[in-house]
Image: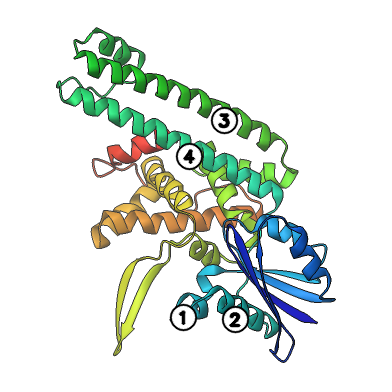
């Protein structure tokens, strides 16, 4: 059995082949196109296992070599510290290190989403892109109107648009606002199209996927968009065997530094998907607003550690609850004694509410 390490880039591929004794048998460098020389070289190796890092453009290469290799391994880039922290870094050296680690069974593996999971992510992330573009255009329009002291909260309602049309603006500013309004209309149309496509995509899901969507919707404050982000970014909630693993994957675990017996808590690690963390935080704000129990938990934490850390703690618990519901196949239900509704202390920031509405 031979072991092939691959340093994959957008335009080039560097390969190193070693045997079980870590002796280098061959080195090759190819362009990504055409692919025939790559196939010919690998086909001549006999039995081999191959490893490449799970970069953004690995999928075409994996599909190319799967029919040829006895084993295809995806390496987790964030855990390959021996490569990332090396002071002697080159494509040849990286490929050799990958091949040697594969031969010694030391590769930290990365999950490869299924074709359906990749398609789901593409749709969800495109919707997020359109939402951010809409927000950016709105902010530009508000910035222009602020120079005239004409901005108002309901600017993008029907009444607000009638108000905007009646205002006297400089011809250049009016022209720019008209251009931005057209851009906003286009993005809104595209987002409605994505929403329809996502609804069709969800309807084609397996019975298990349909059940997961329904269960997650039973959590207060978790809406359709949050559910789609959860399912797409986690690429299968059930693949995480414990709540600790799913929280770590989402980058919600607080870091720690310990020295001389003294421990200091750091901010969360923020590994994984930023979109997943953002959606979960917005859902957590909604949860503490709608549920007296969760609002009580948040208030107690906020008094002890502050509002920011408190909402992150609630976010972690929310993700653990979502993970448990999917694994156990149960709907959400609150357990424990009834807690009266929160008073004036129960408030969610305006910014959080706007973001949830924009989702």
Q: How crowded is mark 2: few (under 14 residues within 10 Å), some or many (20 or more)?
A: many
Residue 179 picture location, percent across and down: 35, 20
At 14% from the left and 22% from the top, the residue drawn is 149
Q: Are marks 1 and 4 in contact (CB under 8 Å)?
A: no
At 52% from the left and 27% from the top, the residue drawn is 190
Mark 3–mark 4 distance (CA, rounded to whole Å): 11 Å
Mark 2–mark 1 distance (CA, rounded to whole Å): 11 Å
Secondary structure found at label 4: helix
Sooner in the amino-acid sequence: mark 3 or mark 4: 4
Mark 1–mark 3 distance (CA, rounded to whole Å): 45 Å
Secondary structure found at label 2: helix
Give the quarter of the figure containing the N terminus.
bottom right
Q: Name the residue under label 1.
A: 86
109 lies above or below 103: above
Q: Name the residue under label 2.
A: 97
Label 2 or label 3, whichever lies nearer to me, is 2
Sooner in the amino-acid sequence: mark 1 or mark 3: 1
Q: Name the residue under label 4.
A: 128
Mark 4–mark 2 distance (CA, rounded to whole Å): 37 Å
Q: Do the residues labelled 2 and 1 touch (CB within 8 Å)?
A: yes
Sooner in the amino-acid sequence: mark 2 or mark 3: 2
Secondary structure found at label 1: loop
| Left/right of residue 348 with respect to residue 338 in the rendered view | left
Residue 108 picture location, percent across and down: 60, 74
């Amino acid at each position: 059995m031979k072991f092939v390490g691959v340093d994959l880039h957008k335009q080039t591929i560097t390969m190193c082949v070693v045997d079980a004794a870590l002796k280098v048998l061959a080195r090759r460098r190819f362009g990504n196109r055409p692919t025939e020389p790559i196939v010919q070289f690998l086909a001549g190796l006999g039995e081999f296992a191959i490893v490449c890092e799970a970069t953004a453009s690995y999928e075409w290469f994996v599909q190319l070599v799967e029919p040829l290799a006895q084993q295809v391994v995806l390496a987790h880039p964030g855990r390959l510290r021996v490569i990332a922290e090396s002071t002697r870094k080159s494509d040849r050296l990286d490929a050799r290190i990958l091949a040697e680690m594969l031969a010694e069974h030391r590769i930290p593996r990365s999950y490869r989403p299924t074709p359906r999971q990749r398609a789901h992510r593409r749709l969800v992330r495109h919707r997020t892109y359109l939402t951010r573009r809409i927000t950016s255009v709105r902010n530009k329009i508000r910035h222009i109107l602020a120079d005239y002291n004409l901005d108002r909260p309901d600017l993008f309602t029907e009444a607000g648009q009638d108000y905007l049309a009646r205002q006297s603006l400089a011809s250049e500013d009016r022209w720019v606002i008209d251009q931005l309004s057209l851009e906003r209309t286009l993005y809104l149309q595209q987002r409605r199209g994505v929403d329809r496509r996502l609804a069709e995509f969800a309807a084609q899901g397996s019975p298990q996927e349909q059940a997961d969507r329904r269960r997650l919707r039973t959590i207060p404050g978790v809406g359709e968009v949050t559910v789609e982000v959860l399912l797409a970014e986690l690429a299968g909630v059930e693949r995480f065997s414990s709540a600790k693993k799913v929280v770590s994957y989402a980058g919600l675990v607080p870091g720690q530094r310990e020295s001389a017996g003294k421990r200091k808590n750091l901010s969360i690690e923020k590994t994984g998907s930023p979109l997943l963390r953002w959606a979960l935080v917005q859902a957590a704000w909604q949860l503490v607003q709608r549920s007296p129990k969760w609002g009580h938990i948040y208030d107690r934490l906020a008094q002890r550690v502050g509002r920011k850390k408190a909402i992150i703690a609630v976010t972690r618990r929310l993700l653990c609850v979502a993970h448990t519901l999917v694994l156990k196949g149960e709907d959400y239900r609150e357990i424990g004694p009834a807690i009266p509704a929160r008073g004036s202390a129960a408030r969610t920031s305006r910014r959080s509410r706007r973001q949830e509405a924009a989702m």
